[in-house]
Image (cartoon, rainbow, N blue to C red):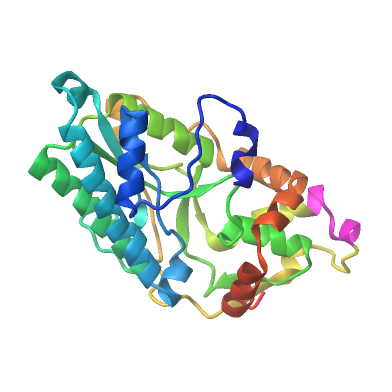
Amino acid sequence: LENLASLEGDARHIFVRGDISDTVLVDQLLHEHRPRAIINFAAESHVDRSIHGPGDFIQTNIVGTFHLLESVRAYWDGLESEFQQLFRFLHVSTDEVYGSLGKDDPAFSEMTRYEPNSPYSASKAASDHLVRAYHHTYGLPVLTTNCSNNYGPYHFPEKLIPLIIHNALAGKSLPIYGDGQQIRDWLYVKDHCSAIRRVLKAGRVGETYNVGGTNKKTNLDVVHTLCDILDELAPPATGNLSLTSYRSLITFVKDRPGHDRRYAMDTNKLERELGWRPRETFEAGIRKTVVWYLANQNWVTNVTSGAYRDWVSRHYGA
């Protein structure tokens, strides 16, 4: 809820705390607000959590998506023909459904075969298939986006970039899985939002669009970049840390089971059909991100409960 504080009092925004599996609530909201579109961001999304506790991922990402689709289908069936044609259900998914790329493999395209390797990615792959099935079977006007790794303000601290920033400022170890040479494509959150809006407005019904930032970095490169920016903007000495650089806190830990080695996204379809491309370079976006976290340490404190801190300590040794 901290993320929504700036929207308080805005008539364009209504917050309802609920569960997409609660069909009574979802049905009520659909008939009360009569939306012209649904964007489904609802998901359990942290790979490490899916490895240690896959049940929540099955329940939310698969069963929850099924219940949501059922409610939306019933609502859509009840619309007049002209409103049925205008309605859209946009399902937000991940590049992880495609699996892992070899060193010289071409980037993932929308035609790449699904080969998910974690409980998280498998659950998202299943939800993608459900969404497409509801289009082909029932005619529900759906759109699907598969995005690369997001970063930016308000990123929950269990994710790599905010975890590294938070730990560094506290003088804690900076855990890196394996050799740190896993490659990810980083997408600034505002670029992702602009892509979602573009697909919702002009995407072809039934189609999938890959969304990427064209910023391919190894995990170790990302951590080095974060340390260097922090050394500049918040030197260790200002936090009473006896370090010359935050890089000295880097600790290599046992690799994650089944850790995908490389992701890369081919976003030519999105650019060709809808004219979208990312605006933010990684260098500019990552600096903006660090600046935001430095200015919003209270937000981090408020969203990291004791249970969260215990979980991080158990699984990352940090």
The image shows residue 299 at horizontal and vertical percentages of: 70, 50
Q: Is residue 255 left or right of residue 317?
A: left
Asked which quadrant contains residue 126, the reply is: bottom left
The image shows residue 214 at horizontal and vertical percentages of: 44, 42
Please, what is the dominant secondary structure of the magenta stretch? Answer: helix
Whether residue 95 appears in magenta in the rendering, the answer is no
Up the image or down, 255 lies above or below 237; here it is below
- The magenta region covers 231-239
Q: Quadrant of the C terminus?
A: bottom right
Q: Is residue 314 left or right of residue 211?
A: right
Total labels drawn: 0
Up the image or down, 194 lies above or below 287; here it is above
Which residue sits at x=27%, y=27%?
A: 273
Asked whether the viewer can see residue 188, the reply is: yes
In-front residue for pair 85/288: 85
Asked which quadrant contains residue 77, the reply is: top left
Up the image or down, 137 lies above or below 122; here it is above
The image shows residue 210 at horizontal and vertical percentages of: 32, 42
